[in-house]
Image (cartoon, rainbow, N blue to C red):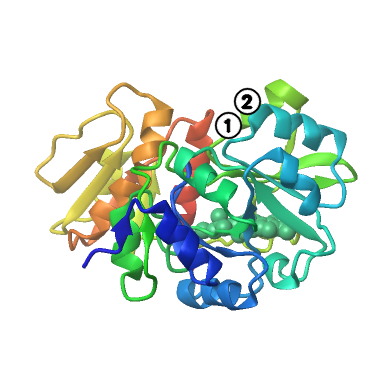
Amino acid sequence: MSIISKDIQKAITLLTNEELVAIPTETVYGLAGNIFSEKAIKCIFKTKKRPFFNPLIVHISSVDVLETIVSEVPKKAKILAKHFWPGAMTLVLKKHKDIPDIITAGKDTVAVRVPNHPVTITLLNQLPFPLAAPSANPFNNISPTKPAHVERYFKNDIKMVLDGGSCKNGIESTIIGFEDDEPIIYRLGALALEDIEAVIGAVRIKNKKEENPDAPGMLDKHYSPLTRTILTSSITKEIKKYPNKKIGILTFNTSFKSDAISYEIILSKNKDLQEAASKLYDALHELDHLNLDVIIAEKLPETGLGNSMNDRLQRAAFSN
Ligand code: AMP
Ligand code: MG
């Protein structure tokens, strides 16, 4: 029997009983549990096979609850919250003393956001506790943007995926931390850098593992298909390197007619970066299930969400 259901009441019962439920958000599906239940939180790490050094994002129903999660809110964080919540932006702030260490990987900061999805906001409004919810995929795999993706990963591990349709943004939230009250982007994501800078001015980016001990989950290899994946600016050149191989290609807007290609997915014929982002992970899931020898992905334009998508594709393509 399918674990996918629209029954919010059932989700409330499971979460109240310290069990996990996969929840829809506008970014990707999350694997959610009560932040104050040690049992539920340990189960999140175990189910995902996520290492304990990688902290979780706390999801709250509205900015009004923020003071129960964090102890300080810098001025620019207040402005950002007002502007972009509910939305695809996570703030990393000094934690409230009641936030358990297992959520923050022992750090004195906590990551928090208000998701912009009506089903999950309704759910959060009816729960007396916030939800910790990392992406609902095994550690390092491709994030889920549809209920069926989660079901494929976890049908034997969890009892329910709360069905909220396909994720509109389709890529993880943008994470912003603060160092001496100055905002720093720890992870590029569904909210474009340009939109953030329009509100608070220039922001530094620190999204590489080496430069960022403050965001312990930023790994070189992440978001990966099992199939070998390559990121390139020239599909035509790259194809020639794999004669007699089964090649799948992922392109922004152009079709590459060639007998060398077994399968092609075009992300947005209209060159719309938002549309491309919403389809990116679904396309990777699809390509990864075709028994290809190699997936060749085309680098996206280096602007707005194109940068966020290139970041994910670079990590998908990373090989030691
Ligand atoms: P995910 O839940 O899979 O979207 O990943 C959450 C990411 O948020 C982690 O991998 C970290 O990079 C980041 N994060 C969560 N909590 C913190 C924190 N307290 N400080 C810095 N980064 C954090
Ligand atoms: Mg994740």
Q: Amino acid at mark 1?
A: Ala
Q: Amino acid at mark 2?
A: Asp
- Residue 4 image-quadrant placement: bottom left
Percent x, y of residue 150? 35, 60
Q: Which residue occupies 62% across, 26% down?
A: 194
Q: CA distance from mark 2 to mark 1?
A: 5 Å
Percent x, y of residue 234? 34, 38
Q: Which residue occupies 71% across, 34% down?
A: 81
Q: Label for residue 168?
A: none
- Residue 213 image-quadrant placement: bottom right
Q: Is residue 292 visible?
A: yes
Percent x, y of residue 195? 62, 25
Q: Label for residue 195?
A: 2
Q: Residues within 10 Å of mark 1 (few under 14, many from 20)?
A: some
User: Relative to 164, is 114 on the left or the right?
Assistant: right
Badge 2 element:
helix
Residue wearing tag 1: 192
Q: Are marks 2 and 1 in contact (CB under 8 Å)?
A: yes
